[in-house]
Every structure is written in C-alpha cells, then in structure tokens.
Amino acid sequence: MANSIEFDLDGQHRPNAYPILASLVTPRPIAWVTTVDAEGNVNAAPFSFFNVFGSNPPIVAFAPGNKEPGLPKDTAKNVRQSREFVINLVDQPVAEAMVATSASLPYGTSELDGLGLSLSKSSVVAPPRISEAPAALECREYTTMEIGTNRLVIGTVHRVHAREGLFDPESLRFDQANYHPVGRMASPDWYCLTDQLFNIEHP
C-alpha cells in the first residue's frame, strides 16, 4: 500500500489501539444488551464490539469492558451472575435512546428510566427485550473469555424476535427494504445509516 502510515500496536502506538481500530473496522453492528441483576433491576447498555459468529449452534459474541481497571461493567457483572442476556438490535428511531443508555450510572440503576421505552417479557430468559427495537435475540452465556483487559462474552441464541414486516411469516424470506440498522463508525461519536445498499451477485 503506497504512502501508508504504520501503527506499532506492540510499541509506541499501543495506547492508541482503541481509537485506531474502532475507527477503521467499521461499520460495526450494535448490540444493545439488556440484563437483570440479582434484585431484578434491568440494565441496558450498547456494545459495538459485537457480531454473530455461527449458526450451529447459533452463537453471538460481544465485548463489555471495565468501568475502571478491575471493575467490570454492569452488563458483564449481570451476565456472570445470571448467565442470560438479550441482544436488542438498533435502527434509527431508537438510536438516540441507545446512546443515552451508554451513560455510567450507579449499579442497580436502570439506564432505560425516562427514555420513553417499554419492555417486553422474553420467552426463555429472564432479561426482558426492548419493545421498540427492530429485533431481539434471547441468549444464554456459553463462556466468557478474558484476554488481557478484554472480556469476550460468547452466547448461544435461543429465541429471535423480529418486527412484523422483516420476514414473510410463511416463506421466512427477509425483506431487506424494511430493515435499516444503525452502524457504529469512528470513535467516539460517529454512526451510519444503512439505507443506501447495493447488490453484487456471487460468482
């Protein structure tokens, strides 16, 4: 690659690894994760280090970091206790509410308070799903890996809820025209819309 800039993530640029990688590896889907604590309080938080990684069994993974060194974020703490979570997907109508739930609040305080959102009971896990989300995945923790200060939660998906109109109920054919999730772009505050798509047929 001509005229490129090289970053040494083993050396001088190691402190800048997050903004470099989070700005380049885009767009990323957003996992808006709901969990419950031991008292039944609902926590909601977004994570863009997230994706689906298999279908047999269906698995997803996301990476909740620490609030501060040695102190896991509430989502990670709740998953460790209950081993259950719901990944709510994000489109433009709920994007601002999603970002609002990234605020750091005292443990046990719901980030959803005052945002005008509603919760729906999940089918097989305790954490509820966000009713206004276009889709939600009910998950159970398979394992959590800790690599350095990174924490990777791997979950199995047991139920999927999708807004009416996304799938044909008989053929299960997906209608891409009705689904425009928000993507995470460069750190700290950039996002993208997905309403300008193009098709390239496989050979």
Image (spheres, grey):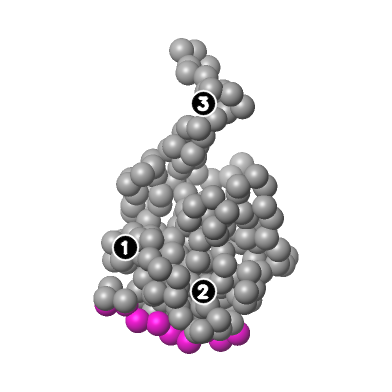
Few, some or many residues within 10 Å of mark 3 (<14, 14–19, 20+)? few
The magenta stretch is 116-124
22 over 159 or under it: above or below = above
Residue 149 percent coordinates (x, y)? 60, 47
Residue 190 percent coordinates (x, y)? 33, 45
Q: Nearer the viewer, residue 66 or 96?
A: 66
Element carrying mark 1: helix
Residue highlighted by disc 3: 13
Q: Is 78 left or right of 187, judged from the image as shown?
A: right
189 over 89 or under it: above or below = above
> Who comes first in sequence, dot 2 or dot 3?
3
Count of numbered tags: 3
Q: Is 145 left or right of 149, judged from the image as shown?
A: right
Residue highlighted by disc 2: 35
Say if the magenta span includes residue 198.
no
Residue positioned most to the top: 3
In the rendered view of the protein, which quadrant contains the C terminus?
A: top right
Give the residue at x 70% y 67%: 142
Q: Hey, what amino acid is under mark 2? A: Thr
Give the residue at x 46% y 81%: 41
Few, some or many residues within 10 Å of mark 1 (<14, 14–19, 20+)? some
> Who comes first in sequence, dot 3 or dot 1?
3
